Image (cartoon, rainbow, N blue to C red):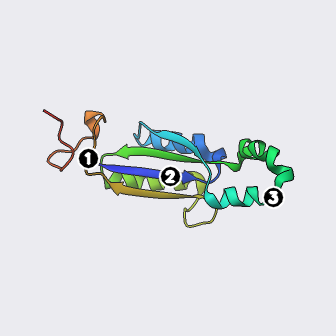
Amino acid sequence: MYMVMFVLHDSAHLDDVVLAWQDIGVTGITLVESTGAYRRQMLTHLGARHLFSLPRMVDAGQASHTLFTIVPDQAVVEQCVAAAERVVGSLDNPNTGVLAAWELDVVRGVPDRLRGTGQPGTESPA
């Protein structure tokens, strides 16, 4: 199993990315509103006079969203990448997002359909 993490730069694409992932069979997507350190620094360098407008700037689309999901194998990871790029364009372009995936050694609490057979860390506890 793999964890997929996608930091989506433009939250206007959030619903479309979620739907694209659901269309390829990905479920259990966790969404977290997030802001990168660089973006936060740029906003806070605006000065104290803009400090009270900072939440409105974040609400107005300055925040990113980070999506997390667990998928069964690397083939589904590649499908997640392709689906995300259909929505936002190539992730090699600036201001689209960052997607990373890594193999999981220990996983508990996921549906049986995600569990592999004979892979370390995927066995159900006795």
Please tell me whether mark 1 sits on a helix, a strand or a loop: loop
> Looking at the image, which residue is at 72% across and 45% down?
58
Q: Reading the chain from its start, which is encountered first: label 1 or label 3?
A: 3
Q: Can you give x and y, in whole percent of width and height, for residue 85 in the image?
A: 53, 56
Q: Can you give x and y, in whole percent of width and height, for residue 68 in the image?
A: 45, 45
* Label of residue 19 in the image: none
How crowded pointer 1 is (Cα within 10 Å; few <14, some 14-19, many 20+) is rated as few
How crowded pointer 3 is (Cα within 10 Å; few <14, some 14-19, many 20+) is rated as few
How crowded pointer 2 is (Cα within 10 Å; few <14, some 14-19, many 20+) is rated as many
4 vs 96, left or right, is: left
Q: Amino acid at mark 3?
A: Leu
Observer-nearest of 12 and 68:
68
Q: Amino acid at mark 1?
A: Val
Q: Can you give x and y, in whole percent of width and height, for residue 75 in the image?
A: 33, 54
Q: CA distance from mark 2 to mark 1?
A: 21 Å
> Looking at the image, which residue is at 50% across and 44% down?
20
24 vs 7, left or right, is: left
What residue is shown with label 1? 106
Residue at the farthest front position: 48
57 vs 114, left or right, is: right
Observer-nearest of 32 and 10:
32
* Label of residue 46 in the image: 3
What residue is shown with label 2? 6
> Looking at the image, which residue is at 30% across and 46% down?
72
Q: Amino acid at mark 2?
A: Phe
Residue at the farthest right position: 49
Quadrant in which the C terminus appears: top left
